[in-house]
Amino acid sequence: MFRFMFLAGILLLTTLAALPASAADTVNVHIGFLQWKPDTGPVLSNVLPEPEDAGLRGAELAISDNSTTGKFMGHQYKLTARVADSEQAAISDFEKLQQQGIELFVVNVPASTLVTMMSKARPDTLVFNAGASDDALRTRECHTNLLHTIPSYAMLTDALSQWLQLRRWNKVFLITGPTPADVAWANAFRRSAKRFGVKIVKDKPWTFDADLRRTAAKELPLFTQGKDYDAVVVADVRGDFGEYVPFNTWLPRPVVGTQGMSPVAWHRVVESWGAAQLQSRFHDLAGRDMNSADYAAWAAVRSVGTAVTHLGQADASSIRQLIFSDRFQLAAFKGRKLNYRQWNGQLRQPIPLVHPRALVATAPFEGFIHSRTEMDTLGFDEPESMCRING
Amino acid sequence: MKSLLRKTALATLIGLSAPAMASLAYVSNEKDNTLSVIDTETMQVIDTIAVGARPRGILLSKDFTRLYICASDDDTVQVLDLATRKIVDTLPSGEDPEQFALHPNNKHLYIANEDDAIVTVVDVTTKDVLAQIDVGIEPEGMAVSPDGRWAVNTSETTSMLHWINTETFEIEKNIVIGQRPRHVEFSKDSRIAWASAEIGGTVHIIDVDKLEQIHQMSFKVPGVNQDRVQPVGIELTSDGKYAFVALGPANHVAVVDAQTYDVLDYLLVGSRVWQLDLNKDETRLYTTNGVSGDVSVIDLDDMKVIKSIKVGRYPWGVVIDPNS
């Protein structure tokens, strides 16, 4: 009898301890999501269009993931999303939401827009870049309160070049499209090729303006004529002509880069490390597959959630401090704990190499070593970047 | 088949009088939709049984007559009759069952529904769903304390241990541990719970009376990058001496002194080691190695890996039937 009462006492105590935190303890976490994507113009391979809500749905899923955890801790998460139709509108949305008291933002806009936004950021505003891969944001145009969850072009092309070196396919034919993004991607690849011993035996800009759906089979073999190369690397970020390169090359060679086999932040075919569950949660929510923009937005909102779970508070400066401490680790379905680079705020992460129906490999690869973490063999290492956002 | 049956029957007979004898290990192959049956005496696969889609967690009924199988992609729990090796029944499980645990009453099955953030409790005799309990995102590990008082669920993305009262089916306590908790194992006396955190790289020791963490372990495997050290399965010897922790892509099993929590050794096994089980007299430990598609057998007298046995693709769970 005594024992029973003792047990009952313990049960009562633990029940009290388990009750949701009282209203006074409720932590409200309010995150702004901003998106503006300029029209990339007509593209040749328009058969399978990219989803228009890429990014936003990833942020929504992460809010729901955070809320499930939050309900056991008295933390409430709210997302205010604005999809703008011009750069001007995106910047004014940013200012308005700051005026409403929002300090945490996840942003999917071009790099130039992001730089303007950061010039209008309040001292405590913390921004996660979930859309712009431009290397300059990681090397020169850094900002103390700007973090990046989308991989830089350099991280993607380093992953690809490591793999080319691993396969000993180290003589490549590079085709670069005409847009600034194509040029930026190709520049990143040239840097990576040098870094990992891949030789660009031919470096040719794409200048054709014919409709390749009718003539790809005639034009591309001539365009890719060359004595020898192991692979063709395509830099066509918006997906204009690149889809027509595979199987139309002069030599029977694989196509890699922005088309063919691509380095990405995320893709439907990633399923290991519990990713199958994230994919299926996302599909239930959005009715489509999760892509890199969705993943970057998801990782940003989950970074906030992970920090708030630790801290029990939601002010941006405490969150920033925790994120850059050694206590922070993001479980993000890539088989390793992820955290942010101290010098430029880039989220370290493995990079999957995928083709449309399967995962080929995940970088970094064994043998590419780094004194800090192998993940720092991808992208700009501390000595290569001018950013020192943590002093 | 006939000779096999006879052998099993004979084995059962002998089993009544002589405890030290060969028994069978069952391994679920996640990407082959099969179970491999291993004779632990010869250490060879003697049968492969077709089961439902994406079999993961498996466990034995308390009387060792049935094997329960989480057929995750079929959204069901299958019941395999061990004497005939036939699926004889299915249980309602909720969506995407991954791991489960059977209460000592041999009736209440606690199932983690990974896609739905709930734990479903099913009475295996009546097939009634007794409760569905809201837990964190991606419920994964399930354990019931040997004294039957607590059911514990781990939620991977929420990073919590949810302590469920087995009489009321209500959560009484949530404990935040390292990132991506995978597995919980109770000591035989129900006083200590061991919980692994895969991404955190840690094992958390919980005092069950106080429901508080009393110790946190981490691991350092020589020559293995720290972020590849990802604890998953845990197995404890019943004498309270040792704990074994499967370290995932570090491809090692840690041997831990269960009293001092010191790591005594790291044993190299196959690629991405997931789950573990001890044989009846606790002289051998079997591990499933997901990526290399095999099972490693560790001899515990010498603490040496003595054999690897090829099974199906992505072996997930392993249980050894002490009674076969």
Image: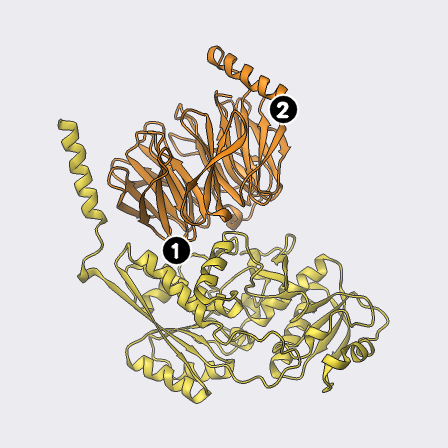
Q: Can you tell which mark lies on residue B1?
A: 2
- Which residue is painted at 57% across and 42% down in the image? B33
Residue type at the position of mark 1? Arg
Q: Mark 1 points at which residue?
A: A327
Q: In this view, does A387 lie to the left or right of B109?
A: right
Circle 1 residues within 10 Å: few <14, some 14–19, many ≥20: few
The answer to whether residue A94 shows anywhere in this view is yes
A83 versus B300 height, above or below: below
Q: Nearer the viewer, residue B41 or A378?
A: B41
Q: Residue B155: image x %, image y %?
A: 38, 49
Q: Farthest bottom residue?
A: A88
Q: Which chain is in yellow here?
A: A
Q: Position of residue A265 (x, y in %)?
A: 55, 65
Q: Residue B181 carries which label?
A: none
Q: Chain B is drawn in which colour?
A: orange
Tell me the residue at 83%/69% (across/down).
Answer: A251
